Image (cartoon, helix red, strand yellow):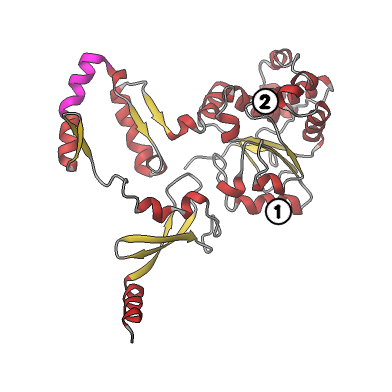
């Protein structure tokens, strides 16, 4: 055996495969990791995972590079004299315990900033312990991955339903008509609407004769799969959604059905969107007025329909308004809390 063959055999003997769940977002896709010694050398989707069925996004595919990044923190850092140095966990916690109370007493609780990010917030410990700490700190200086991702949805859901975690998600397996805004689940496997094999469910929707409409400035992989791609101008989602609501009212297509007895403020919504006609918003959205009307009529005519907005509808100037209007459309078409429409799932 040559020296090269011996080296290859040694590496093969030292390498192993580990099945893990990707911690980088709530899609929780299955990973197959190749590990040599203590180093992750490769990552691919786990085809046998009952949830993701082999799907993997660019973040998961780069897991090995992230794990081996020379700038990745592997322990606490303590600042002394303007410079950071490595410290032990005991030393770091002792320092926090010693300095936290004097800091709060001198500057108030809001001087303490808390940042919660992936993958911490997707762990059981991350769900249990930070609320205890935050309730004791009483700080409003809280920042999370959701702050730049989905916070408008939490705010609009809190104001509309009384609970920021009451987020209605599309019934992908039974809907006849799905309108996606700012979402690309063929790349991300979905978020805030985590579902097994999200891309497969969109393809199944098309196979059973359903309609998929994607509103996105880019022609994404999801947009290429759709029956219709609406290339909206970035940041104008709220205008488009308001115009869709206006058409539903104007053409007497709004029909909340059994939801009507639970609604308050329907006339206020009608008045709020009155001036946002398709003709009024078409120039700003870069979407023809006739196409806006077709989108509204398609939602109203479908036996069941669901409107779903994600990052693209959140990380814009009027993100909270856009996310509220997503649910307004689901309500006006009678598709809120309805099979084939949008449903409120139970949290873990």
Residue at the disc numbered 1: 204
Q: Which residues fall within the magenta stretch? A: 98-108
Badge number at residue 160: none
Q: Residues within 10 Å of mark 2 (few under 14, many from 20)?
A: many
Task: Note whether residue 250 is visible.
Answer: yes
Task: Note whether residue 189 is visible.
Answer: no
Residue 107 included in the magenta stretch of the image: yes
Residue 163 included in the magenta stretch of the image: no
Q: Secondary structure at mark 1?
A: helix
Q: How many marks?
A: 2
Residue 305, position in %: x, y? 73, 38
Residue 259, position in %: x, y? 70, 27
Q: Residue furthest front?
A: 3
Quadrant position of the N terminus in the picture: bottom left
| Residue drawn at the location 45% of the way across and 53% of the way down | 62
Please say if 61 is above or below 320.
Answer: below
Task: Give how far apart the Cα atoms at labels 1 and 2 are.
Answer: 27 Å
Residue at the disc numbered 2: 328
| Residue drawn at the location 61% of the way across and 25% of the way down | 324
| Residue drawn at the location 71% of the way across and 43% of the way down | 175
- Residue sitting nearer the eye, 258 or 238: 238
């Amino acid at each position: 055996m040559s020296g090269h063959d011996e080296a290859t055999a040694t590496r093969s003997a030292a390498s192993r495969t580990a099945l893990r769940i990707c911690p980088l977002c709530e899609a929780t896709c299955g990973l197959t990791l190749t590990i040599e010694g203590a180093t992750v050398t490769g990552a691919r989707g786990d085809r046998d995972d009952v949830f993701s069925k082999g799907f993997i996004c660019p973040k998961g595919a780069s897991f090995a590079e992230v794990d081996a990044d020379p700038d990745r923190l592997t322990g606490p850092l303590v600042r002394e004299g303007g410079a950071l140095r490595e410290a032990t966990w005991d030393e770091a916690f002792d320092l926090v315990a010693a300095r936290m109370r004097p800091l709060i007493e001198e500057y108030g609780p809001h001087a303490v900033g808390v940042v919660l990010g992936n993958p911490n917030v997707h762990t059981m410990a991350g769900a249990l312990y930070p609320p205890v700490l935050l309730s004791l700190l009483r700080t409003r200086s809280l920042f999370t991955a959701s702050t730049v991702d989905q916070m408008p949805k939490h705010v609009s859901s809190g104001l509309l339903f009384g609970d920021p975690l009451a987020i209605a998600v599309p019934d992908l397996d039974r809907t006849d008509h799905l309108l996606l805004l700012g979402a690309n689940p063929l790349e991300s496997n979905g978020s805030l609407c985590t579902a097994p094999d999200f891309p497969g469910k969109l393809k199944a929707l098309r196979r059973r004769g359903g309609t998929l409409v994607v509103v996105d400035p880019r022609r994404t992989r999801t947009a290429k799969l759709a029956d219709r791609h609406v290339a909206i101008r970035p940041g104008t989602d709220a205008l488009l959604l308001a115009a869709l609501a206006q058409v539903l009212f104007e053409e007497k297509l709004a029909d909340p059905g059994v939801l009507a007895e639970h609604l308050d403020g329907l006339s206020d919504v009608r008045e709020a969107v009155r001036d946002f006609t398709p003709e009024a918003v078409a120039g700003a959205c870069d979407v023809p007025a006739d196409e806006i009307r077709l989108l509204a009529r398609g939602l109203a005519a479908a036996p069941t329909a669901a409107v779903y907005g994600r990052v693209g509808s959140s990380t814009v100037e009027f993100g909270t308004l856009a996310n509220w209007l997503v649910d307004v459309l689901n309500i006006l078409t009678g598709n809120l809390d309805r099979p084939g429409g949008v449903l409120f799932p139970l949290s873990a």
